[in-house]
Structure formats: C-alpha cells, structure tokens
Amino acid sequence: MKIGGLIDISTKDIPHKSAMVIFTVGCNFKCDYCHNKYLLQPNVGREYEITELMQTIRTNVLVNGISISGGEPTLQPDLLELCKEINTIGKYISIDTNGSNPEVIKKIAPYINRVALDLKGPIDSEKLKKITGVNVNIDRIAQTIEFVNSQDDIGFEIRTTFVVNLHKPEDINEIIDFLKRSEFRGNFVLQQYQFLEGVGEEFKRVFSKPEHDVLLNLLKPYKDEKFPFKIYLRDEIVGYCSIDELSV
Ligand code: SF4
C-alpha cells in the first residue's frame, strides 16, 4: 500500500475514539482546495507491505481505532487485505472516501465500522466538475451513498466543506434535499473551509473561509425540521456541534 504519512494518535478523526491515521497516496479527484495536495503526487511516501503496516498498528496500543484516509484510499489495491487484517485484531476501522468507488466500499463493508464520505457538492455533474477538477460520475457516488446507507452496522458520516468562491448557499440546500430524498440515516456535517499550507500559496486568495454566521445561516432553515439524519456544524467557533445545540 502506498502511504504518504501516518499519525500515531489523533482524537479528531473518529468521534469518541483515539485513532491512528493512515494517509494513502493518490486521488482520482483534483480539488484545488485540497489540504493534502502532497498526497496527489505519485512520488511521495513509500510502499508498505500489509505485514509491516500491521506490525505498526499492533504495537500502537494507545489507539482503539484506525482511520484510513488520503488521498483516496479505495484506489489502493490491497485496501481489502488491510481491512481484513485490522478487523482480526478488533480495532474500529473508519474509511474516508470521495464516494467514487462503490465496488470497493461494498467489498470492504464486512470488515469496517464507519464510512466518512466527502460529498464535494450537490449531485450535479457540472457543479462537481467545477469543484473537483474532473468529470465525476454522479451515479457512482449515489450508489456508494445508497449502499452504505443500507448497512445498519456501518456508521455513516457525509460531510461537505463550504468554500467561499466555490460553493453557493443553494448548493447546501440541494445536498440536504438529496439526503432527505435518499432517506439518509447518518450524520451530515457542514464544514468550514480553512486555508492550510497544503492547499498551496497560489490558492490563498482564490478561496476563502466562510464566517461562522454564514454557516449558521445556511443551517438555520433546518433547525426545527425532523429528518432521519442529524446535521452538524464543524468550524473554529463551535468545534463539532449538532444544530439542535446551536443558537441559530
Ligand atoms: S477528493 Fe479529497 S484527497 Fe482527493 S483531491 Fe479532493 S480533497 Fe484532495
């Protein structure tokens, strides 16, 4: 497996768990606002045998979960083998994905505990092309969502990062409408974009951070609605907070 970085312990990547984070190399999207652009270069990191990776995981007694992130982990040919191995030692497994690879998600489903799907924008080919820089097959993303949604024993988070100059308020309305129609049963998280070095200096002035009030106003119309899913805000003011607890 091609790995670009490992974090021994993180308390931010899987809610209520201490997790080791594995960053896989390579992605099939080219989002200009990507925080992990170094992982999109083919020559970064190195190949790990699954046995070597498992040795590192086994000796990390401080964590009870493993977050497999990227990049896009579903592009790694030995992801299934890794998930099976981690599953045998009983650690909780969470996969980050852009949702473009439903076949791989279906294969690894029996061995994982959680999927965190980055929904880059509304399920709309033109909008997703603008946001991701590639032609996105929206049917494949919808298939991934439908499949994970049908797996009651897999925790499911769908998150969208709101980037000023890239997303419009109506995009969030479209996403929430889509989740309603899909009878989504997990957590939807609206995330605040923040510039980090990994995005690259050339994009510093292209994209900007939405202020807390902007995000609150986006969620306001949904505060008293009853959904089969929960809505959360993740930003620098509230951290990670359900809209039920927000003063909107
Ligand atoms: S899908 Fe994620 S990892 Fe891939 S380019 Fe976009 S932000 Fe980066």
Image (cartoon, rainbow, N blue to C red):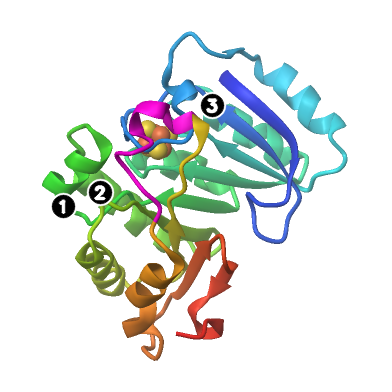
Q: Which of the two residues, 147 or 28, is positioned nearer the viewer here?
A: 28
Magenta span of residues: 198-209
Residue 184 or residue 62, whichever sits in front: 62
Residue type (three-letter) at the residue carrying disc 3: Thr
**163, above or below 197, in the image:** below
Q: Which of the four quarters of the rendered structure image does ligand 1 lie in?
A: top left
The residue at the point 49 percent across, 68 percent down is 233
Q: In the image, which disc is placed on residue 24?
A: 3
Image-quadrant location for residue 123: bottom left
The mark nearer the N terminus, 3 or 2, is 3
Distance CA(mark 3)–CA(mark 1) = 27 Å
Residue 48 pos. (x, y %): 64, 15
Residue 165 shows which numbered tag?
none
246 up-or-down from 121: above or below: below
Residue 206 picture location, percent across and down:
29, 39
Q: Is residue 123 visible?
A: yes
Q: Residues within 10 Å of mark 2 (few under 14, many from 20)?
A: some
Q: Residue at x 54, y 58 (%)?
A: 154
**Mark closest to the chain's N terminus, 1 or 2:** 1
Dot 1: element? loop
Q: Which mark is residue 124?
A: 1
198 vs 123, left or right, is right
Q: Residue at x 24, y 72 (%)?
A: 177
Mark 2 CB in 8 Å range of ligand 1?
no
